[in-house]
Image (cartoon, helix red, strand yellow):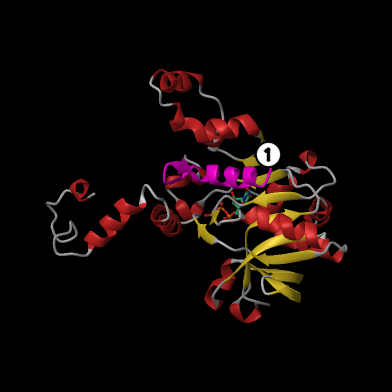
Amino acid sequence: MDVTKAIIPAAGLGTRFLPYTKAIPKEMLPLLNKPAIQYIIEEGLSAEINNFLVITGKNKDAIANHFDAHPELETFLKERNKSELMASTEKILRSTYFTYIRQSEPLGLGHAIWLARHAIGKEYFSIFLPDDIIISKVPAITQLIKIARQEKGSVIAVQEVSPDSVSSYGIVGIKKQITPNLFQVSHLVEKPHPKDAPSNLAIIGRYVLSSKIFTSLQDISGYAMGELQLTDAISHMMKNNEKVFAFKVQGVRYDIGTPIGWMKAVIGMALQDPYYAPHIKKFIASIDTPESFLYNSSKNIEHQL
Ligand code: UTP
């Protein structure tokens, strides 16, 4: 089973991050010195996925611009021996195909995926929700592809969540536990009340799915109320004999769809980075001391770094 294509649905309105998201896509939020979506592409490339179908909407042009050549800037940097500043994006440009598909109205995640149907053949493909940044030794999508090959079925990434959080996620029902981290799925429930949740395993933003999902999306679109849900289509696909597995991905997941989640990601990632970590650790250690800027409005933060 080769998985070489990824759909990245990025057409949501980002209401939890307004007003930032009014004109700027949240996929372009900075995480250290790169926009969030660059981490998603790099995760895909490390799993030999090089064909990205990005579902975009209004005000999302910055994403396509970021992954485009910029000859003037390249020449400018080359003349000053600073080409390494763009090395990571150059590498992406050399090895990646991007297709942008416009979703003219935010009709749901299922609808966004369905729009990419013409670009996917009869093959397994991946989905990356760009709100979820997963930092791990083995890239999260590589972990899922391995399971999809082993079990010859579709795989969803899951994470254990507390009972009071289940109502924010799609939750998986378990048919069979195969290993401590791998489950065969019986059904899916979208945002259940804690007492109706079939487990505490929440779906997070990585999937490897059979192309049968497009038939299911088509079949359920007729009776979908409001947004077309991907979870409903996955449940429908299971009824049509596609096996679906849930895998507890190993790694740290940051949900950058809210300001707090994004702040945690910036701090968490900075603390893991050899260049940024010493600066941030020193800054954090100095914050709650009587000498800090918190208690001395005249102090210049810059001098503490
Ligand atoms: P969310 O439900 O998180 O929505 O979508 P959102 O618009 O991004 O953010 P909020 O909730 O308004 O703050 C999950 C993923 O599905 C995409 C989003 O871009 C996000 O990556 N999506 C959602 C679409 O591409 N189209 C849609 O119609 C809905």
Residue 131 in percent (x, y) is at 54, 53
Q: Does the residue labelled 1 lie within 8 Å of ligand 1?
A: no
Q: In this view, does 41 lie to the left or right of 275?
A: right
Q: Is residue 258 above or below residue 4?
A: below
**Residue tagged 1:** 50
- Viewer can see residue 244: yes
x and y, in percent, of residue 95 in the image: 64, 33
Residue stretch in magenta: 28-52
Label 1, residues with CA under 10 Å away: few <14, some 14-19, many ≥20: many
Residue 145 on the magenta segment = no
- Residue lying at 11% horizontally and 51% vertically, measured from the top left: 298
Residue plotted at (49% across, 54% down): 256
Front in this rendered view, residue 271 or 289: 271
Q: What residue type is labelled 1?
A: Asn
Q: Residue furthest right?
A: 241
Question: 40 or 111: which is nearer to us?
Answer: 40
Q: Quadrant of residue 176?
A: bottom right
Query: Depth check: 260 or 97 in front?
Result: 97
Tell me where residue 269 appears, x and y as whole percent. 43, 54
Q: Does 297 sit above or below residue 290?
A: above
Q: Is residue 228 visible?
A: no
Looking at the rendered structure, the secondary structure element under dot 1 is: loop
Location of residue 96 by image quarter? top right
Name the foreground residue: 7 vs 194: 7
Q: In this view, does 39 lie to the left or right of 149?
A: left
Please give the name of the residue rendered at 45% of the width and 59% of the height, measured from the top-left corner.
Answer: 261
**Percent x, y for residue 134?**
55, 56
Q: Residue at (83%, 42%) from the top-left corner?
A: 121
